[in-house]
Image: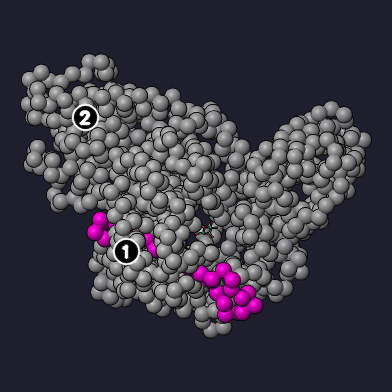
Amino acid sequence: MQQNPASFSADPGRKPLRARFLLAGILLGSALLCAQAVSSASPTLGPGYPAWLAYHPVSLEAVFASAGNVPDTIVMLGNDALEDSAARELALGWRGMLDRVPRVAVSAPSNEIAGESIVVLGTQAEVRAWRPALAGEPALGADAYRLHRAGNVVLVEGGDARGVLYGAFALLREIAQQHSLPALNLRSQPWAAVRWTNEWDNPNGTIERGYAGPSIFFADGQVRADLSRAAAYARLLASIGIDGCTINNVNADAHLLLPENLKQIARIADVFRPYGVRLSLSIDSASPMVIGGLDTFDPGNPRVADWWRDKVDEIYRQIPDFGGFVVKADSEGQPGPSRYGRSPAVAANMLAQALAPHGGIVLYRAFVYNHHLDWRDPKADRARAAYDIFHPLDGDFAPNVIVQIKYGPIDFQVREPASPLFAGLPHTNEAIELQITQEYTGQQRHLVYLAPLWKTILDTGMRASITKPGTAPPLTVSDLVSGRDLQNQHHSLGGFVGVAGVGTDRWLGSPLALANLYAFGRLAWNPSLSPAAVSDEWTRLTFGNDAQVRAMVNKLELNSWHIYESYTGPLGLGTLTDILGPHFGPNPQSAEGNGWGQWLRADHQGVGMDRTVATGTGYIGQYPAPLARQYESLQTCPENLLLFLHHVPYTYRLHSGQTLIQYIYDTHYWGAQAAAAQIPAWQSLQGKVPDAIYAEVLKRLEFQAGHAIVWRDAITKWFAKMSGIPDDQHRVGNYPHRIPATDMTLDGYTPVDVTPWETASNGKAVECTGRAECSLSLTWNKPDGWYDIAVQFFDFRNGVSQFTLQVAGRAADAWSADANLPDNRMNGNTSTRHTIDNVALHRGDTVRLIGRPDGTEPAPVDYLEITPSGQQK
Ligand code: GCV
């Protein structure tokens, strides 16, 4: 039964409710407008891209047993903005999934609803007041919800109004997955109190480590006039239980705290509020000097404390539900309390004191380290820093301070062990910092579903329980960040922070990367969920319930981290990317010989940091004894962390019997092949997923397959040179189908050296400068046949060079170097592959590549690879 919105009217007998009922009508009207926007946007990737809130049609019978049972009325027991959002969301879901337009009513006396199927939304207190017998026992806590079916009532009951909103999203999730509702009875509460994203947005609209376009909050030094995307983002966050968002870069601009800017920032808080998302700010700890006119920012100075107290009071006048501060201090050039010989605890507590009267908190980041370490010192170790600095302060932090700890001791690498600091703060609130934006994991150009990586950390058993020593499994990282202490009691605080980096380009740019934002929220809510379950949920919500789509998308997501790890950094060595540049392409040498401390310690005999207690930096000794014992010994150290913890000879035999060096070669070849195999896997879904999403994902997977070859070749060549040990399958450095550009006949192109050498054939490529057009050519002198021609060129961020490939004088293909990759030099960040399949070549044909430079991009080319069609590359 389809209701016409125009027929909404209040019950004439219940006049006092009329105004509220009309309000509901207006709300529903806006919900419907929104619904239209969502449904027309869903097949596209435009501004209204709905991500997992796509609300695809479902089978009414599967969900409600029969179409007649579908509730057509949503009753709000309360009068709260969050409950309004819940009702609006249900209306959207009903429209998209059930093709119904539900009536929204603001009260539900029992005589009005007798016999009618209804959804009732209310807090536990409201449900008790309405129908005491329906209220759940035991009491629901903050943000918790209960979904319950009793006769004709589908109850969405919240511990508070936010819980009602979360319950509404949970109900929609159930429906979207076609779970049967008649026996609905589900309670859920968040694992940890703090579930925030950190956005690293700058006032000028850029985003540090963001890979999806400009900021949704700021442009040109101002808060955006149009905050509709910020509101839509809050809705996405609420749908996965995220309750806080820090809107600016941890490398913070103090000027955001100026009164005129706070007024504007309050507008963002206003659009977050209906979704229960509290706004917070990253701060520059030197603000009292930078914008406050003081001559010090010493946290021990009462004038500084007064300045912060006044500033915090001012913030709360503008933003009454302000969440608090995130602090990056004494880190990577940011000022901090060390300037005055003060500890992080002194700095954090001074801020905490200002925030406490308002209920605000401080998330003080443990990412504090010296980036001018002496790399010649074999005992120096950046991985030790967080524990060395923060462990001695355990117990010194105020109750509204949380120490925010990156998941690993270095920096969001493709694999790291859990930071030992999680176990080192038994008397301090802790949060784990995960990274949703793929800084070191392919920048959304490579498919990497991060939930399996995060789970390795969250599930790491860190500390034995004191109440049941030796009997219970050790407390895991997820236990510790939930606020459980050694006595297994809860601290008041703890949680999850996800560095999201969403931008205007459909949130994360890559449609499949959105599984990471979704997974972050779901794991922050319930870290015992499996990555597979979360992927499946996300897939069904995003693409619907088609079995083939589910199976394939899940397979792609779940295999992706392993594939990426295989062709980047092996066995815990780190991502092996360009750490002095954009952290994207291969450049292992960049990690060595500088003060940043991401050293590989590779030499001609072996590789890996010796972090043992016996002979190394002693880092392993920061772990609790059982874990330290396991990590210390080569025999028991998990092999996937081997090179993080030990310096190992290339000839060392892994448990499989394979040598370390051969393992590195083999996994890199396997990884590149597996990346290529993702393309036909995705192609099998053509016509089954929206065309625009299909095309966008295909484009990214094709890029990834080419870049995986760049990675494979660079890393294997680098290790072959370093170790002097050849690949026993003769693949490394031996590319029989490749013709380096420098070996071809050049017309206008000139050879240049490429740095690092391993990212181009023989360390050289060709560039076209001072001419509008250059070309390189060869005469085909192999048998006639069908061939795939891969052109390896460099695609800079600036400039759009044009390429044309001609065979025997006829154009075989033409393309633009328009990928906007994160560098303007020839190297592993920009090396790109364009493949033309099934080209007929005859002996004697001229194969010519014409390049037309654009601006500072000189149409650079590395090589052509001409392979019999169908043969592995
Ligand atoms: C915001 C890494 C990133 C930086 C980031 C820093 C941090 O070093 O590369 O861009 O700065 O981590 O987390 O503070």
State yes or no: discs 1 and 2 in contact (Cβ < 8 Å). no
Mainly helix, strand or loop, the magenta region?
A: loop
Which residue occupies 49% across, 49% down? 202
Q: Position of residue 810 (x, y in %)?
A: 84, 27
Does residue 648 sit above or below 513 in this rendering? below
Amino acid at dot 2: Ile
Going by the numbered disc 1, the residue's amino acid type is Asp
Query: In this figure, which residue is indicated by the disc labeled 2?
Result: 74
Q: Nearer the viewer, mark 1 or mark 2?
A: 1
Residue underneath mark 1: 306
> Which residue is the extreme one toward the right?
844
Q: What range of the chain is rendered magenta?
A: 356-383
Tell me if mark 1 has few (under 14), some (14-19) or many (20+) residues whose alpha carbon lies within 10 angstroms of its own: some
Q: Nearer the viewer, residue 4 or 186?
A: 4
x, y percentage for residue 766?
82, 47
Q: What element carries label 2?
A: strand
Where on the picture, by quarter, is residue 818? Answer: top right
